[in-house]
Image (cartoon, rainbow, N blue to C red):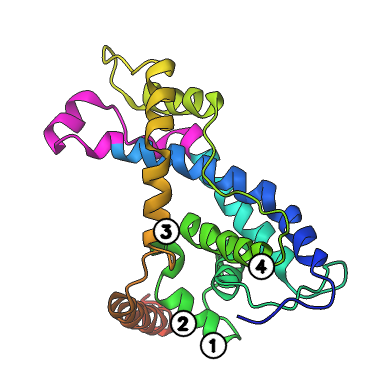
């Protein structure tokens, strides 16, 4: 890890710039994580009986997921060395990975990229398979490690739990449960979120790379290349009269 530059306060300023996005992303991701766990704790038979739809299909869940994506874009763009961003003089973990995710989120319909690294990323479907909250959390931890060296203020040392998170989780479950199936109360969900926040944080820290699997990435990339080859051949065929 490189040392801080001549003005270590720059890093403290940058950390403050991204702190809100990281905080909100962790809160949103934790709610959707618990919603997923709530659904998949049941057998497939019980899922069909108790739920009218997967929680991921609800509008509230989608809004929270979009908040995570927006945080990725904001943090990655803020960390780019450009006019208006203070130079920090250190290497930040996950900066490059988040930059790839940022481009994929900002250009979701792009198939061919001029950047070979980005093309590999898209071909391997890393945007779909990597857990972005873990990347964001490790990036934040990386910055905090450097801030501590300079006895500077750190941000987001733990995943926050608020009452509104319980309200949103309750809304997701109410929208996804079948008619006649009662949702847990907000009070119960709030206590559950509080009791398990440290466990969720531990999961993030066990997979700082977002849970990458290079072998499966190669398999997906090969299948995608073969798919597009078939599509190009199909599109090149003359129409039958």
Residue 83 in percent (x, y) is at 87, 72
Kindly state the secondary structure of the residue where label 3 is placed.
helix
Mark 2 or mark 3: which is in front? 3
Q: Which residue is mark 2?
A: 120
Which residue does the image show at 45% across and 37% down from the upper left? 31
Q: Which residue is mark 3?
A: 205
Main secondary structure along the magenta-highlighted residues: helix
In front of the other: 44 or 226: 44
How far apart marks 1 and 2 lie (CA) works out to 6 Å
In the image, residue 160 above or below residue 233:
above
Q: Mark 2 vs mark 3: which is more N-terminal?
A: 2
Does the residue at mark 4 contact the one at mark 1 (Cβ under 8 Å)?
A: no
CA gap between label 2 and label 3 equals: 25 Å
- As for residue 126 lying within the magenta part, the answer is no
The disc placed on residue 201 is: none
Residue tagged 1? 116
From this view, report whether residue 71 is shown above or below residue 159: below
Q: Which residues are magenta?
A: 38-61
Magenta-span inclusion, residue 50: yes
- The residue located at (30%, 78%) in the rendering is 223
Q: Which residue is mark 4?
A: 149
> Gap in Å between the C-alphas at discs 4 and 3?
20 Å
Tag 1 and tag 2, C-beta contact below 8 Å: yes
Q: Secondary structure at mark 2?
A: helix
What residue is rendered at 15% in x and 29% in y? Answer: 46
């Amino acid at each position: 890890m490189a040392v801080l530059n001549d003005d270590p306060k720059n890093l403290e300023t940058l950390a403050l710039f991204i702190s809100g996005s990281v905080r909100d992303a962790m809160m949103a991701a934790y709610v959707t994580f618990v919603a997923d766990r709530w659904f998949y704790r049941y057998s497939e038979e019980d899922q069909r009986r108790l739920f009218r739809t997967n929680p991921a299909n609800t509008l509230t869940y989608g809004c929270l997921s979009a908040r995570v994506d927006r945080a990725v874009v904001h943090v990655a763009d803020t960390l780019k060395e450009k006019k208006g961003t203070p130079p920090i003089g250190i290497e930040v973990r996950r900066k490059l990975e988040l930059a790839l995710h940022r481009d994929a989120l900002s250009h979701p319909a792009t198939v061919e990229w001029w950047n070979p690294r980005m093309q590999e990323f898209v071909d391997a479907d890393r945007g779909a398979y990597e857990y972005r909250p873990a990347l964001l959390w490790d990036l934040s931890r990386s910055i905090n490690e450097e801030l501590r060296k300079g006895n500077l203020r750190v941000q987001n040392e733990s995943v926050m739990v608020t009452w509104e998170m319980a309200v949103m989780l309750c809304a997701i479950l109410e929208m996804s449960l079948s008619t006649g199936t009662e949702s847990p109360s907000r009070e119960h969900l709030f206590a559950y979120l509080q009791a398990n926040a440290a466990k969720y944080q531990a999961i993030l820290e066990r997979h700082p790379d977002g849970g990458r699997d290079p072998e499966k990435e190669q398999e997906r990339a090969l299948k995608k290349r073969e798919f597009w080859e078939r599509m190009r051949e199909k599109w090149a065929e003359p129409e039958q009269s």
